[in-house]
Amino acid sequence: DDGVNYANHNSAADCATCGAGRYSGEAAAACVTCEAGKYSTDTSSSCTDCPQGRYSGVGRANSCAVCRYGKKRIRADTQTESLACTVCESGKYSIAYVDACTDCPGGKYITDNGVNYL
């Protein structure tokens, strides 16, 4: 006996889960944290870009936050809505989850920035 304790890793059940906001590729010895603007769920092999209208500025994100109604996303890689989202310009509106605001149709208008068109 050489005095060293050897682990007998003989099944996939011996492999640890990285957890949300982290990922690993095949045959990895460690997990990698997702960068800002991306997220992952448990057992991911990669991070996913935040979808349109969403943002994430923290490592280990398991989801992305949403730009609210009347706003559009301008950055995906920041922690706060005030940096990630901006209000729509006058004459435009938005629903949640968008990267661009929509023009009011002919015969209608919005004078205030960030107001929802209903």
Image: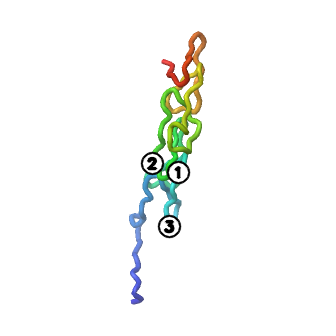
Q: Which mark is residue 29?
A: 3
Q: Secondary structure at mark 3?
A: loop
Q: CA distance from mark 1 to mark 2?
A: 10 Å
Circle 1: is it few (<14), some (14-19), or many (20+) Cα within 10 Å?
many
Q: Which mark is residue 30?
A: none
Nearest to N terminus: mark 1 or mark 3:
3
Image location of residue 53, percent across then percent down:
53, 35
List the residue tagged with mark 1: 47
For the residues bearing labels 1 and 3, Cβ distance under 8 angstroms: no
Observer-nearest residue: 111 or 6?
111
Image location of residue 109, percent across then percent down:
57, 14
Question: Which color scheme does this rendered protein use?
Answer: rainbow
For the residues bearing labels 1 and 2, Cβ distance under 8 angstroms: no
List the residue tagged with mark 2: 62
Where is residue 77, by image quadrant?
A: top right
- Give the residue type at disc 3: Ala
Q: CA distance from mark 2 to mark 3?
A: 21 Å
- Give the residue type at disc 2: Asn
Image location of residue 29, percent across then percent down:
50, 67
Q: In the rendered view of the protein, which quadrant contains the N terminus?
A: bottom left
Image location of residue 10, percent across then percent down:
41, 71
Q: Secondary structure at mark 2?
A: loop
